[in-house]
Image: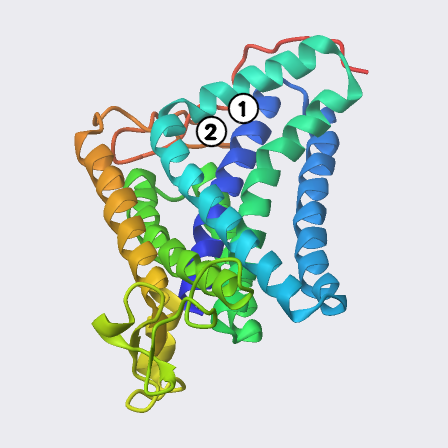
Amino acid sequence: MLASFLIGLREGLEAALVVGILVAYLTQLGRRDVLPRLWLGVAGAIALALAIGAFFTFGAYALTFEAQEIIGGLLSLLAVAMVTWMIFWMQNHARTLASGLRSGVDRAIATGGLWGIVVLGFVSVAREGVETTLLLWSMVQSFGNAPESLAGAVLGILCAAVLGWLVARGMLRLNLRRFFTWTGAFLIVVAAGVLAYGIGDLQEAGVLPGPNTVLAPVVDGVVAVGWSGFPFGWAFDLTTAFDPTSPAAVILQATIGFTARMSWLQVIAWMLYVGVVGALFLVRAVTASPSPVPAPPTAGPTTETADSNLHSSALSPHSKETHEHPLS
């Protein structure tokens, strides 16, 4: 539940900040009349994320076991790829996020089309929604406890909505740079566990060599464990000494992807992902310039500038300058 809560909190806060920037900028431009179009796009993005989750959850029942394992494994790899891209994208574009969104609003208004604002709202939220859906679906498939995982994600999203509203109103100063750094590091560990699970699925389906294939080393009629099982056997097997239902096992499984029995390919993939992606993330975080990271514009009468600690905000919607643009 902790992992899904933090995923919902991070992704939800990112989406809330994006929407906050768009709403405040449209308010500053005196174009609150187009806000319903923005919310229509946001609603469409949420509906897309829910539809994808429902399709993956209920559509798999009609498939064979091998097909389910292949699809589950591939979707887990896709979720890991999207999360990895999102983590580094945020590191690169956090400082220019607000200006990029404002430019998108200006372009949409300049074209005078109905769908410009709708599409902007949709695209701005859909990425976080699809990423969250794929990652949560992969986690539920990997670690079970679907009700707890979904409850944690919903709670995280609700907390993110409240935090985003408080930040946008200027009622809360949140160190977003530090927040996204720490949650990004946590997501790297979670994604490594999802990667290991995806590889396990592909091994069970016979797509990758593993303990369930003919390439597995066998000792005394059973698949070898430890160094004798390298590279396609079990790296370790603690099923007889480690209760998988114990609190410690559940926490380890939900956070770092540890299970009582893992193959060598799973362990190697986990270590390589954490080592390579974690090192790159750490280096970029340490060497990043301490220049300000934009935060959403405030909806209040004052204007504050986000510093490197994200004492945030931006444009005041009460600016006396109003831009008139035709928008049908």
Residue 238 falls in image quadrant:
bottom left
Q: Where is residue 166 in the image (x, y as percent from the top left)?
A: 46, 45
Q: Residues within 10 Å of mark 1 (few under 14, many from 20)?
A: many
Asked if residue 12 shows in the view, the reply is no
Q: What residue is disc 1 on?
A: 317
Disc 1 or disc 2, which is closer to the eye?
2
In the picture, measured across the screen, residue 72 lies left or right of residue 33, that is: left
Q: Residues within 10 Å of mark 2 (few under 14, many from 20)?
A: many
Residue 312 falls in image quadrant:
top left
Q: Kindly identify the amino acid type of the residue bearing the numbered disc 2.
A: Pro
Q: Which colour scheme is used?
A: rainbow
Is 142 in front, or is 184? 142
**Residue plotted at (29% across, 43% down):** 277
- Say above or below: 289 vs 234: above
**Residue plotted at (35% across, 27% down):** 92
Residue at disc 1, secondary structure: loop
Residue 240 falls in image quadrant:
bottom left
- Mark 1 or mark 2, earlier in chain: 2
Asked if residue 229 shows in the view, the reply is yes
Q: In which quadrant will I find the N terminus?
A: bottom left
Q: Position of residue 58 (x, y in %)?
A: 73, 65
Residues under numbered marks 1 and 2 in contact, where contact means CB atoms less than 8 Å apart: yes
Alpha carbons under labels 1 and 2: distance apart? 8 Å
Q: Where is residue 176 in the image (x, y as percent from the top left)?
A: 34, 40
Q: What residue is disc 2 on?
A: 297
Q: Kindly identify the amino acid type of the residue bearing the numbered disc 1.
A: Pro
Q: Position of residue 49 (x, y in %)?
A: 65, 49
Q: In which quadrant will I find the C terminus?
A: top right
**Residue plotted at (57% across, 39% down):** 127
